[in-house]
Image (cartoon, rainbow, N blue to C red):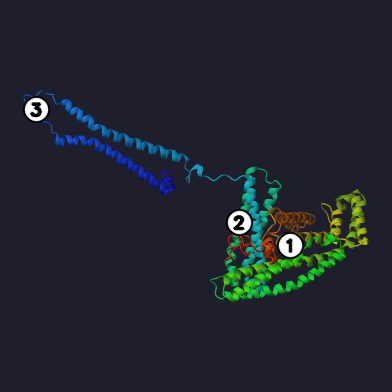
Amino acid sequence: MTSSLIRGRPRRATAHIRVRVTHAVLGALAGAGWLVLPVMTAELHDPVPVASAGTVPGAAAPQQDGTSAADLVLPLIAGVTAVALAGYGYLRRTRRARTRTTPGTVSAQPPVPTPADSERQARAALRLADDCVRASREELTLVAELFGEKQTEPFTQALRAAETELSAAFAIWRRYEEGVPQEAGARRQALVGVIGRCAEAGRRLDAEAAALDRLRGLDEAEEGGDRGVGAALVAAEERFRELAARAVTAQETLAALRERYAPPAGGPVAGYVEQAKDRLLFATARLNEARQAADTGDRQRAVRHLRAGEGAVVQAGVLVDGVERLAARLREAAALVPAVLTGAEAELAAARRGPGRTATAGPQARPAHADLVLAAVREELTGGPYDPLDALRRITRAVERPGGSRSGVLDTAALLVARGSVAGAEEFVAVHRGAVGAEARARLAEAVRELAAGNTARADAVAGEARGLAERDVRAYGTPRLGTEAATAGLAGAVLGGVLLAETPDAGPPAAYGGPRTRSRHQD
């Protein structure tokens, strides 16, 4: 115990104690010197005389006694002073030891975080880990196109492992939000589990970041790095030109959707074409700067602008794909609606045949309510433009039941609706991740789990919640204030989309494959 405390004491404090001990010893030596000095003086300069016959014994005694008392005054004062100094130093050391916070003492223990603090840490960890996974997935899609699946397999495995850890963290967090577990200590451990899972997801990605740069030829120490940057630039520019043409087509597709279907049908992709053009504008500037930097031999600057341009190109692709996928789903849904109506009416007819059939084949909702829903959908079919996906959603929910089999066309319709909802929420979060919080991401992760488990109705509902929360976060976040020139160059959209990490006043470095430790490594 003593040795450990000594080892834990600061060196400066030890030096002060040595000085005090030295002062005390010197004071004691001075006092002892004053005590011995009279005796030495008496022996050297005033030897005891031999008494003569005529001398009266004891006549000189008074003079000797007076000299001895005077000689003892100064030594006594020095001794008392030394003792007082030593006592004062001891008291100061004792008082300081009681109030000092050194490692190993009780007062040095870190304070226990409150539940609110732990929840904030868990939310921040979830958001950071989700951002790392999404940015890593974006870059890996480009790398796989250049090098093939075989060479990128280690990075794909690391990404899958990170996705698994993150999914588990979101599942723990979702149960925590629902009040499970209930005991306070167990809830604290649940939050620790969330943070630990997120940290492990980031560690898996961090471990492969340097190897990915070496494969791409982006590492400063890698020979032939200029060729790696050049090849990546060529691939990014080719994809950019393809997306520029597709963005024009997507604009036409969106206009056709507005004419053919009711306005709410195109709501999930409202503004996507404009955002795609904004990302492409940003990509144009960054890829040009990367080309110039590569030509002058400034590889670090070239890599930074290359990654920013690549990220913007990928997000432009997500936005354009979103418009095209919605158009395809609406066409498929419109073709399914008549058959789904027929299947729903067959379900209702089976429910009305008797109580014995209702328990196994009857719908969960009341037949009268289902009849109203089906009648409203039939009226929409003949009344002009309508939203086919919303029609399928209402039909499948009207005849939904907790268990048992139902007609295949109804299951097909429910799956189409759920996939569309989950994909729409995923696209929105992906291109707005700079503003979307942990709650929306957690709902989206839950929707993905429900869809994988075959719970289509639940997946559709939770995906709608996720989309609503994400849109709320984006409205609250607003537009980053980066100046007129920055907004014109698409910088604000890049920050909103998480292409740039906004860690510095100039919007920060681009996001790259990796965890929290390596994702911002491409910076000047």
Q: Total of numbered circles in the picture?
A: 3
Label 3 sits on residue: 51
Q: Nearer the viewer, mark 1 or mark 2?
A: 1
Label located before the other in sequence (3 or 1):
3
Do the residues under discs 3 and 2 have CB atoms within 8 angstroms? no
Q: CA distance from mark 1 to mark 2?
A: 25 Å
Question: Where is residue 302, by image quadrant?
Answer: bottom right
Distance Cα–Cα, label 3 vs label 2: 99 Å
* Disc 3 and disc 1 in contact, CB within 8 angstroms: no
The image shows residue 120 at horizontal and vertical percentages of 64, 50
Q: Outermost residue toward the left?
A: 53
Q: As shown in the figure, which amino acid type bears the numbered disc 3?
A: Ala
Which residue carries the number 2 mark? Answer: 199
50 with respect to 1 (left or right): left
Identify the mark at residue 427; answer none if there is no mark.
Answer: 1
Question: Counting other residues with Cα less than 10 Å from the Cα at mark 3, is it few (<14), some (14-19), or many (20 or more)?
Answer: few
Residue type at numbered disc 2: Ala
Find the residue positioned furthest to the front.
Answer: 484
| Element marked by disc 2 | helix
The N terminus: image quadrant:
top left
224 to 75, vertically: above or below: below
Specify which label sits upstream in the sequence, 3 or 2.
Answer: 3
Q: Nearer the viewer, residue 222 or 520?
A: 520
The reply to whether residue 471 is in sight is yes
Q: Report if the CB atoms under discs 1 and 2 are less than 8 Å apart.
A: no
User: What residue is rendered at 21% in x and 37% in y?
Assistant: 37
Secondary element at tag 3? loop
Q: Residues within 10 Å of mark 2 (few under 14, many from 20)?
A: many
Give the spatial CA distance, label 3 vs label 1. 121 Å
